[in-house]
Image (tube, grey):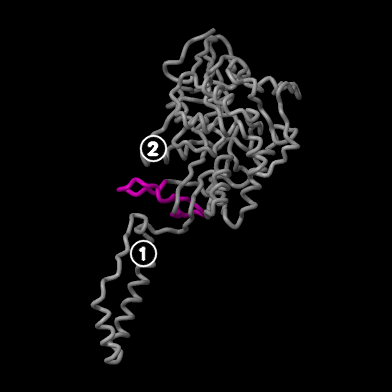
């Protein structure tokens, strides 16, 4: 059933009142016709919902929060399916992009072998209870990522680079391709880039171009942080987002959904201490992931998972009794099986080692606590 706004309702009521006045001045024939029509069945009543009681400042089919890879892919996908989309991004354009903008620009690729990818990521889960459909979605995406990026996002496959065994600038990035060669399915796993370069923002810029190419379907609001989700108190449906824009709060209605693509919480020390029990650390990557979307999701009753998972690299031990320093990525909050986000690509079993991404946390006396969560932790030296 079509839903109408309060403004439309008021306009309709005024129209009905005017019709009544004009009918009262009509001829007797007209009055007779009006009398006859008044005995007809009453018109169907319009239903009102909670959303009809909110003062909306803008309306879109889909509202996307955050303009990293997940947000841009979600917006592009929705637009290609006929939706009018807005991306709300808290940073100004030059600082937007999250970890996607400043990461190595690599993507995991299983060379078309979904079964190998599934074996690999199932092993990396290390016994964690991961829903089969999530592993299946990850495996399908990773198996076909080279084609997806070319066919759906316009990258040139002739420019792709497989980094397996490549040692450039002393980084030996090829040693991480595959990252965990002891896992089943590793022989098909590799790290690729969309051109012969890395850590240069190339993948990010290509994804952003997909957004700007759809200017008729996708609006981008920079410097417009989302503040809260607007939820129907009865049905619990999220019907919109409150956004701060140009110094004032605006309510944006989302007719078909809100996509939360706001990254992790590595730049929120309180959340890092609460969920990860880490105090001395430095966030590595984007500097604006403060858990905003996670807190908004919690406020509407979201059931979060994997909040103790993170990627920590390059722990620095400062001496016999000095506190450690940990470089940290927090890409762990999960509140929907969103296939658009690159952060779903790495459920992982922790493996100790100096250069492999995993959960490695160094302590003052050289001890390391290794493990993805309670029940899988152990001490090592």
Quarter of the image where one finds residue 317: top right
Q: Residue at x 62, y 17 (%)?
A: 181
Q: In the drawing, does residue 23 fall left or right of residue 163?
A: left
Residue identifier under label 2: 302
Q: Main secondary structure of the magenta part?
A: strand
Q: Split into 4 quadrants, where in the image is the N terminus?
A: bottom left
357 to 77, vertically: above or below? above
- Asked whether 233 falls inside the magenta stretch, the response is yes
**First-in-chain label (2 vs 1):** 1
Residue 127, how many percent across, how many down?
46, 19
The number of numbered discs placed on residues in the rendered structure image is: 2
Residue 217, how many percent across, how many down?
57, 55
373 to 43, vertically: above or below? above
Q: Split into 4 quadrants, where in the image is the C terminus?
A: top right
Quarter of the image where one finds residue 116: top right
Q: In the drawing, does residue 345 fall left or right of residue 14?
A: right
Q: Residues within 10 Å of mark 1 (few under 14, many from 20)?
A: some
Helix, strand or loop under label 2: loop
Residue 213, how many percent across, how many down?
65, 52
Residue 333, how many percent across, how many down?
47, 32
Question: Which segment did they paint magenta?
Answer: 229-254
Residue 6: mark in rendering: 1
68 to 246, vertically: above or below? above
């Amino acid at each position: 059933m079509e839903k109408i706004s309060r403004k439309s309702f008021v306009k309709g009521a005024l129209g009905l009142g005017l019709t009544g006045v004009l009918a009262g001045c009509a001829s007797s024939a007209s009055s007779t016709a009006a009398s006859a029509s008044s005995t007809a069945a009453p018109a169907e009543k319009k239903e009102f919902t909670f959303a009809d009681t909110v003062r909306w400042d803008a309306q879109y089919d889909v509202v996307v929060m955050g303009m990293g890879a997940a947000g841009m892919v979600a917006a592009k996908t929705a637009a290609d399916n006929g939706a009018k989309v807005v991306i709300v991004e808290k940073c100004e354009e030059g600082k937007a992009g999250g970890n996607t903008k400043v990461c190595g620009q690599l993507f995991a690729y299983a060379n078309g072998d979904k079964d190998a990818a599934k074996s690999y990521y199932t092993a990396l889960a290390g016994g964690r209870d991961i829903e089969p459909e999530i592993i299946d979605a990850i495996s399908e995406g990773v198996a076909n990522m080279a084609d997806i990026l070319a066919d759906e996002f316009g990258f040139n496959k002739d420019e792709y680079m497989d980094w397996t065994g490549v040692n450039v600038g002393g980084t030996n990035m090829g040693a991480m391709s595959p990252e965990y060669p002891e896992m089943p399915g590793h022989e098909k796993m590799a790290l690729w880039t969309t051109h012969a370069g890395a850590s240069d923002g190339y993948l990010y810029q290509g994804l952003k171009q997909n957004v700007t190419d759809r200017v008729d379907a996708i609006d981008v609001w920079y410097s417009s942080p989302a503040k809260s989700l607007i939820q129907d108190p009865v049905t619990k449906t999220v019907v919109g987002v409150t956004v701060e824009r140009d110094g004032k709060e605006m309510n944006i209605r989302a007719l078909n959904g809100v996509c939360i693509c706001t990254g992790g919480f590595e730049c929120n020390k309180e959340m890092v201490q609460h969920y990860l029990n880490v105090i001395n650390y430095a966030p590595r990557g984007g500097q604006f992931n403060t858990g905003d979307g996670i807190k908004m999701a919690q406020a509407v009753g979201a059931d979060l998972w994997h909040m103790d998972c993170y990627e920590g690299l390059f722990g620095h031990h400062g001496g016999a009794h000095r506190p450690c320093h940990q470089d940290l990525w927090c890409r762990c909050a999960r509140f929907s099986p969103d296939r658009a986000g690159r952060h779903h690509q790495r459920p992982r079993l922790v493996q100790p080692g100096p250069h492999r991404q995993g959960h490695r946390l160094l302590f003052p006396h050289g001890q390391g606590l290794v493990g993805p969560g309670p029940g899988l932790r152990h001490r090592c030296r």
